Amino acid sequence: MKLNYFNSTIASLGFLLLTPTLGHTQTPGVHQPYVGVALSWDHLSGKHSESLSSFMGKNLTFSQGRSLSTNQFNGYLFLGTFFNLQQNWFISPEWQIGQGTLNRQLKSTSRDPDMLFAERHLNSKLSRKMTTNLVLRGGRNLTKSVQLYALAGVDASLFKYSTIYENIDFSGGPGLGFKTFTHSKWKFAPVTGIGVMKNFDKARIGIEYRLASYSALKMNRTVHTQGSTETNSSKMKPRISSLMLRWSYSL
């Protein structure tokens, strides 16, 4: 239901953006600072791999190229400045910040041949806790009120990865509980996108699409249990795309 409502809103807004504004005669100034808010449908994609080097030296594979796919609505704040150039072209540096929350639960099992093929469990979770980016938008005024543009810049996002490791009694007894390992890291990525917006005097409303692809997050953890050592290895390469409804106001 949410997705259908969102698609209907996008279609209605797209029609509004491409409809000329009657009576609009104001020409934007050469230098126009602005602030605004955005509602974004964020999509996390990419691949995840995780393995465990057991106490007997065997490599147990829990995940190999597993999808990270998940979606979430998020809100963002932004500010920037428009610079009008010759022949209806413009550029606009812009800074954006938001919580940008995304969570992906990754529960995996693998059979251990050294423990009568008992199932071993790893419960992992990848989260984005905060995001900010700086972009340069450049485009052309299609009419006095409608603008089409592309953007490029850099994104910085704080990712948190946690793994719940099950302590095993290697003598065959019951489990010994769980250990939770967490790791947080800021990751940087190039961000690109396209958008269209429409002016209503000092206000602007628009649709924008952005894509950021991050380098791989790699983590290795050593676990000591009952005098034995096991190593948990994780690797993931997240990618986040965003479809935004944006509203801004010129100061």
Image (spheres, rainbow, N blue to C red):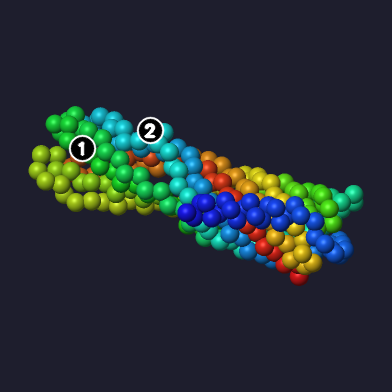
Marks 1 and 2, how far apart at CA: 17 Å
176 relative to 73 in the view: left or right: left
The residue sitting at 80% across, 56% down in the picture is 20
Q: Nearer the viewer, residue 39 or 175?
A: 39
Q: In terms of sequence position, does the residue under pointer 1 or pointer 2 come before the other?
A: 2
Check the image and report above or below for 32 versus 18.
below
Total numbered badges shown on the rendered structure: 2
Q: Is residue 86 left or right of residue 117?
A: right
- Crowding at dot 1, Cα within 10 Å, few <14 / some 14-19 / many 20+, comes out as few
Task: Please state which amino acid type lies under the numbered disc 1.
Answer: Glu
Q: Is residue 106 left or right of residue 184?
A: left
The label shown at residue 183 is: none
Residue density around tag 2, few if under 14, some if 14–19, many if 20 or more, within 10 Å: few
Between 194 and 179, which is closer to the camera in this rendering? 194
Label 1 sits on residue: 119
Tell which residue pokes out farthest to the bottom in this image.
251
> Percent x, y for residue 247?
67, 62
The image quadrant that residue 21 belongs to is: bottom right
Residue type at mark 2 is Gln
**Where's residue 198, x and y in %?**
75, 57
Q: Are marks 1 and 2 in contact (CB under 8 Å)?
A: no
Q: Position of residue 230 (x, y in %)?
A: 26, 39
Q: Residue furthest right?
A: 86
Q: Quadrant of residue 78?
A: bottom right
The residue that label 2 is drawn on is: 64
What's the residue at 53%, 58% (across, down)? 74
Q: Secondary structure at mark 2?
A: strand
Q: Decide which of 145, 149 is in the foreground and name it.
A: 145
Regarding residue 186, the answer to whether it shows in the image is: no
Identified at 31% across, 44% down, the residue is 107
Query: In the image, is residue 250 above or below residue 213?
Result: below
